[in-house]
Amino acid sequence: MILQMKVNEIATDPNTYARKWKETTSRPVIGYFCSYTPEEIIHAANALPMRIFGAGDGFIKTDSHLQAYSCSLVRGGLEEALTGRLDFLDGTVFPHTCDSIQRLSDIWRLNAGIPLHLDIVLPVKLNTDSAREYMLKVIRKFKIDLETGLGTPITMHSLSESIELYNRIRNTFMEIYNLRSKYAGIVDGRRILEMIKCSMTMDRNDFLEILTTFRDELINRAANFKQEKRKRILLAGGICNHPDFYTVIEKSGGSVVYDDLCTGSRLYTGNIDSSGDPVESIARRYMERVVCPAKHSGITSRGKNLVEMAKEHKVDGVIFLFLKFCDPQSFDYPYLKEHMDREGIPSMLMEVEERLPSEGQLTTRFETFIGML
Amino acid sequence: MSGDRIKDPEKERRKIKSVVKMKEIMTKYYIDAKTAGQSGKKVAWITSGGPVEPLIAFDVIPVYPENHGAMIGASKMGIDLCEKAEAMGYARDLCSYARTDIASSTVNGGPIGGLPKPDFLVCCNNICGTVMKWYEVQARYYNVPLFIFDTPFIHTELSDEAKDYVKKQMSEYIEFLEQQCGVKTDWDRMREVGRLSIQGQKLWQEVLDTTTHSPAPMTAFDAFFHLALIVTLRGTQTAVDYYVQLRDEMKERISQGIGMVPDEKYRLIWDNLPVWYRTKWLSDKFASHGACLVADTYTSAWSGVLHLIDENNFLESMAIAYSSIYINISIDSMFDILKNMIVKYKADGLVMHSNRSCKPYSLGQYDLQKMVLKELNVPTLIIEADMVDERNFSESQIETRIDAFMEIIKHRK
């Protein structure tokens, strides 16, 4: 282990971890925003990829750059950069995501003072041959840009090793997800969230060790696990960065058994083929992975996918969890809800601003919903 | 009858005469579109920044939900339709063009009783990511094919990879149209449409250029209105003929010394989409201070990439040009264009509409404001509003801010 820090501490304060990691290893740290960032390439460049979640609340410097109708991820991320809390970063990577992140990239490049700035202008539609070809070229270009920017050549060997490591992380996560789905309530949701956050912060070799231990603990626990009666919940949306959500859902008699989040299953489903050209394999995973609503892969793919997920994990209800002002998620909501209604699966919508509603309010809403399932 | 009021001859003199022709053309256009079923023509819905020329060449009637949104806004019918969309589950924070259009489809609402049903949809995301989500909604609702023209955003450059990608998509688009229409491409016709499109864009720019003259023969508020043809009928002789007429009228006004704002003292530039339900109020408000909005970043978007279009390689060069429009580029590149405009039109100030509906246009305005002040020493007023949803317009607050801003401008001059 490069650093001895507790998982919950890293999850609450990833910046301190990354800063110390850099001091200890003298290696670069690269910040990024979206699950379409090819972390494998950053890792292969001997750098630490770190996902930026943004300061929870108290936006002061951001307000002179961004209107109040931008989401809390965009505003919070910029606040962190402008207040110097990310001054240890050697670079930032912006994969093309949505209109807001697109402009954030400009504002960031002009104001954040972080040396390396890389945009990965991904295709938005992912279901045509020309898009596939463009995706591959863009990822190749990113690899070269990163090599140039960091002055570190990325060998095919190191990239293949990196892919192997990430595949192991993905597989272990999926094992944990399956255990959670099979034994609802076997693990507190907040502990899963801690793991997810650490997976985007920690030295990835060290993280795999911790994740493997965590999985083994769960396997042991499963042997004597007595199933309680809990309502099975699917959490769907963008990022979930609030441990309290899980706690309140659990207190209300529910248990998240699966998710469709970009800080969840979307991040860890689908391995990268480790034979063949590694860059091609990375590009292929992005073309085939379950899409984020800011990408296009047909007009009903997300709806069908959500129904399949809900059936496979036998969920009793779906909680849609969006950041307020997230356009892509909000546009899909009526149609996804309709898909759920058609299957007779109840759902509720929770829009989150930078500050969570009070625990009392959250409890009332979740209790009411879970109570009627 | 004494109902015939005596008209103020000064006011009459300042009215743009071509307006009548424009209304005629747009009425005919919407009647044609709404009766397309009877004429056997296909109808395609297309985004305002989308490559419409191939549709014209295939004799498809292009219909613009965004233009419809503007009409809904200008007719002050936005709130009702926005609320209807919200009842359907669409968040109030979403684009008001999208909300009103989605709602209008279900009730045939708005000033023209809804748009004609599309046979297929063409969505180009060079203006925003929102249009893609919006067109997905409509493709599901009408159960029709959707073609997405994906134009990679230009943060620093349009890479060679991106150029290849958009050129390939132009071919895919043509194939898609051949399939939808069941006919092969008529290349002579395509070339002709390309020629007319370029001519129309040039003429539109000439119209906009007339306001470099002081007093300006028209204002940005007039440009918002006269824009409709370069958006909807780009690539047709109709648009070309109309803009010749409009340009000549503007030149005539210049030679006669007719300005749109009586006693023009201050010249301002507008940024972002119009506040459709308040164009008159805003226009009068600025005019009361002797201020004329002489140009804007919005209406010039339809001629801003002319230099990239090659008549002899129309489709490919158009793919590059469509990817390079004002709103698909980074803030610093936008600033370069804005800077040129401020200098070209000799502007004393900048008015930015921070438009809740349009994030790619509005986010970054605060940085632009700082750059404009730093490099050009030109002050900026930011108005928080929305293009269609009147609930986001606070008259008293905006009035106070305009008055205060005009005081600054007056002191500086």
Image (cartoon, rainbow, N blue to C red):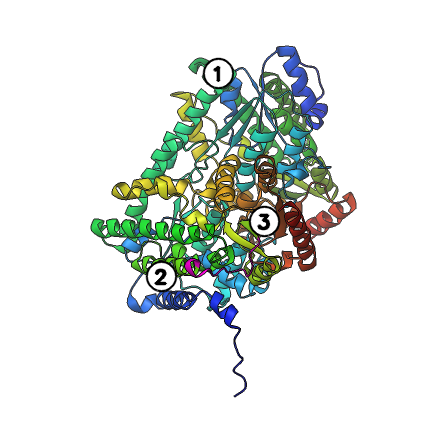
* Element marked by disc 1: helix
Q: Which mark is residue B245?
A: 2
CB atoms at circles 3 and 1 under 8 Å apart? no
Q: Nearer the viewer, residue A262 or B202?
A: B202
Q: Amino acid at mark 2?
A: Gln
A89 above or below A263? above
SS assignment at label 3: strand
In-front residue for pair B189/B396: B396
**Residue tagged 1:** A161
Quick one: which residue is furthest to the top in this view? A25
Of tags 3 and 2, the one toward the viewer is 2
The reply to whether residue B48 is in sight is no
Q: Residues within 10 Å of mark 3 (few under 14, many from 20)?
A: many
What residue type is disc 1 on? Answer: Glu
Using the numbered discs, state the Cα–Cα distance from disc 3 to disc 1 in whole angstroms.
54 Å
To which chain does the residue with label 2 belong?
B
**Which disc, if any, is residue B69?**
none
Q: Distance from label 1 to label 2 (Cα)?
A: 68 Å
Would you say A258 lies left or right of B193 here?
right
Which label lies toward us, 1 or 2? 2
Instruction: Please state the chain letter of the residue tagged with numbered disc 1 in the rendered image.
Output: A
Q: Position of residue B55 (x, y in %)?
A: 32, 53
The boundaries of the magenta stretch are B254-265
| Marks 1 and 2 share the same chain | no
Could you tell me residue A117's position as x and y percent? 53, 26
Question: What type is the residue that disc 3 sits on?
Answer: Val
Mark earlier in primary sequence (3, 2) = 2
Circle number at residue B351 = 3
Across and down, in percent, residue B212 comes to 46, 50
